[in-house]
Amino acid sequence: MPRAASRVRLDQPRPARKRLLPEYDPEAFGRFSERIARFLGTGRFLVWMTLTILLWVAWNIFAPPALRWDEYPFIFLTLMLSLQASYAAPLILLAQNRQDDRDRVTHEQDRKQNERSIADTEYLTREVAALRMGLGEVATRDWIRSEFVDLVKEMEDRRSVFPPEPASESDEADR
């Protein structure tokens, strides 16, 4: 029976394994990287970076030799700037990727909204056309007036062709 115990059960989830790397929340890390990228793109960052470099250089030139930590070629300063750039670039790219994802979702929603608007517009266009066709069959005030004018002209034409007979007294009695 020892063989049955080592068999993998497919109907049950695997037990959690210990991970060597620490776990982190990708969303929180993404928000953090966006804040850093937003700060790196400001004038405030450039001013602080410039002041830091000027103080670094000034200290390592004018301070007493025992207190200097980075002599003239400023190799440690170069290392620190390279380290800052090596972290800033991926964080900026991560923030850009997150912004691209948001833009993609926004564009997709806009596209769907445009499709709905186009469908609504086409529906309303068909309805207006149907109403126009229906109104084309309805007798309008102008059409009725023109028919009355035509009837009056026709009656006047008949009067000229068939003049009215003088009224006789017998007609008046019949009425």
Image (cartoon, rainbow, N blue to C red):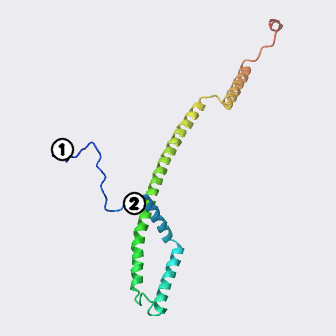
Give the number of the mark in front: 2 or 1. Answer: 1
**Is 22 drawn above or below residue 153 in the view shown?**
below
Residue 21 is situated, as x and y percent measured from the top left of the image, at 33, 62
For the residues labelled 2 and 1, say whether their Cβ atoms are less than 8 Å apart. no
**Is 10 drawn above or below residue 71 in the view shown?**
above
Q: Which residue is mark 2?
A: 24
Residue 174 is situated, as x and y percent measured from the top left of the image, at 80, 6
Q: Which residue is mark 1?
A: 4
Residue 154 is situated, as x and y percent measured from the top left of the image, at 69, 23
39 on left or right of 157: left
Q: Nearer the viewer, residue 5 or 83?
A: 5
- Amino acid type at image mark 2: Tyr
At 42% from the left edge and 71% from the top edge, which residue is drawn? 88
**Is 33 drawn above or below residue 115 in the view shown?**
below
Where, by quadrant of the figure, is residue 68 drawn? bottom left
Where, by quadrant of the figure, is residue 141 drawn? top right
